Image: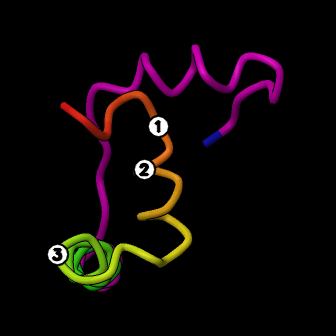
Amino acid sequence: MDYDHEEEERALTQVRAFTADRAALGALMEHLNVIWTDIEGDCEGDLAELWRESSAFEK
């Protein structure tokens, strides 16, 4: 992605679609499964911890 760092949040909210090859999708799914397993378990991984500390956690 090519975006100005200061506009990062706004730029990412404007993404409506992306494309990826099978290897990239496989890596993404593997990463999401690690996060999900952590959330279902002890929720101590870095990304799960960030999520737990966010305003979206209770939702």
Which residue bears the numbered disc 3?
Answer: 40
Which residue bears the numbered disc 2?
Answer: 51
Find the distance from the CA under tag 3 to the CA under tag 1. Answer: 17 Å
- Tag 1 and tag 2, C-beta contact below 8 Å: yes
Q: Quadrant of residue 10?
A: top right
Give me the residue at 73% from left, 16% from top: 7
Rendered view: 22 above or below 17? below
What is the quadrant of the C terminus in the image? Answer: top left
Mark 3, secondary structure of its residue: helix
- Tag 3 and tag 1, C-beta contact below 8 Å: no
Mark 1, secondary structure of its residue: loop
| Type of the residue with mark 3 | Glu
**For residue 20: magenta?**
yes
Q: Quadrant of residue 20?
A: bottom left
Which residue bears the numbered disc 1?
Answer: 54
Find the distance from the CA under tag 3 to the CA under tag 2. Answer: 13 Å
Q: Nearer the viewer, residue 22 or 32?
A: 32
Give me the residue at 46% from left, 77% from top: 44
Q: Where is residue 21 drawn, in percent x and y?
A: 28, 72
Give me the residue at 36% from left, 73% from top: 43
Number of disc labels: 3
| Type of the residue with mark 1 | Ser
**Span of residues in magenta:** 2-28
